[in-house]
Amino acid sequence: MDFVVRVGTPEGRVQEQSYQAADEAALRSDLEKQGLHVFSVRRRGVSAGVKLPALAWGRRKVVNQQEFLIFNQELASLLKAGLPLLQSLDLMLERMENQRFRAVLTDIRARVSSGADLSDAFALHGEHFPRLYPASLKAGERSGELEAVVRRFIRYQRLVLEAKKRAVSALIYPAVLIGLSLVMLLILAVYVVPRFTEFYAGFQGELPLLTRITTATAFFLRDHIVLILAVSVVGGLLLRRWVNTPAGRVGFDRMKLQIPLIGRVLHLFALSEFCRSLSTLLAGGIPLVPAFEISTAAVGNARVRSALEPRIQMVRQGRAFYEAIEDTGVFPAIAVDMAKVGEATGGLDEMLTSVSDFFDDKVETLLGRILSLVEPAMLVFMGLVVAIILLSLYLPMFSMLGQVQG
């Protein structure tokens, strides 16, 4: 039978290799005779990862950012208090309410107790956690300052969460206003307008052009509402399927960056996300090239990420970091200049933090400006639409009054 075995070598390395043996017991005995420490043995074809409960709608994350922030705060506190890592994990497992996170953390705890590093255990579940996290843990394990690295990651996570909350809070009111406006227009078109049309059924003469356009639109919406909804649902599913492809994701994110005003906010937020991730990794002692690679993968916008990925090889070949990001065409000149100064003075991580703060301030300013423009624009737009609908409904009355007076 074929087995996949995770073993520790006399030199201290942990490896995963394939072996053939009659059974698991015979394989373990043979490997121990060779001086290897056996951490785990599994049949080939059997998943090594923990089996998680089914995730709704195909979601891969088992823990949201807020829960993960609390987890790291507790971990840092327990490590600072002097508790061993395994005992800290046991205490957090006892209080864990998220069952999917508990299942993953149980597997991580088992791997750590078998001799694996905490960073390696989290990396094996990389699809469930930020890729930045295992790399940060690895830096802390190398330097012997795991608690300090976890706290640095906490600061990073707080800043990212605060930036996202500010963005969402600024956009909630316009979104609600647009939604209510669409509902009101739908009610007017589907319910109110047809009632007036019945009232004008006996009207002698041709209705005004504006009235005919309004009533035709209303009847079309009323008679084809099911078809419109079905087409919308199918279109949404096809769009989602396209977005889930690599090319579709890049294309969709490119379109988002081209939206007036909003695209600029999304662009700056992606750059801030990259700079803050890279700064966190560099401050933790990760070399520039792997830090660059990990930070690029952490960028949420696929268009910005696709512009950064080819430049990793440039830095690997010896090009300056500021030249690489300048070549992307997505960084403003001031960010490139600040990176150049930071690289020349040996303080790239601190300079990248300043760049990220600068981008965050720009995002907040732009969001405030957008909010100040969207509110009156939406009110004016809705006022015009309602005025047009009411005018189209009352024009025939004015016409009838004119005929009576004539």
Image: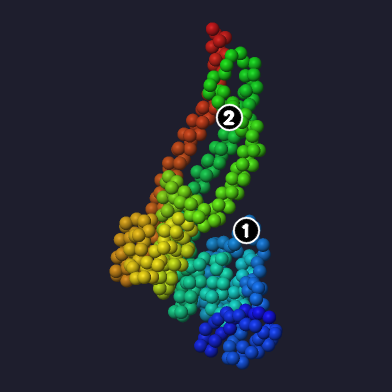
For the N terminus, which image quadrant?
bottom right
* In this view, 25 is above or below 94: below
- Residue drawn 58% across the image and 83% down it: 7
- Residue 40 visible, this angle: no
Q: What element carries label 2?
A: helix
* In this view, 120 is above or below 193: below
Give x and y (percent) for residue 152: 45, 69
Residue 279 vs residue 71, the one in the foreground: 279
Q: Residue 58 carries which label?
A: 1
Picture quadrant of residue 314: bottom left
Question: Which residue lies most toward the bottom here?
Answer: 33
Q: Name the residue under label 2.
A: 217
User: What number of labels is visible?
Assistant: 2
Q: Earlier in the sequence, mark 2 or mark 1?
A: 1
Give the CA separation, mark 2 to mark 1.
Answer: 39 Å
Picture quadrant of residue 333: bottom left
Question: Is residue 238 shown left or right of residue 311?
Answer: right
Residue 392 vs residue 172, the one in the foreground: 392
Picture quadrant of residue 52: bottom right
- Residue drawn 64% across the image and 38% down it: 227
| Callout 1 amino acid | Gly
- Residue drawn 52% across the image and 83% down it: 13
* Badge 1 density bin: few <14, some 14–19, many ≥20, Cα 10 Å: few
Q: Which mark is residue 295?
A: none
| Callout 2 amino acid | Thr
Give x and y (percent) for residue 350: 36, 67
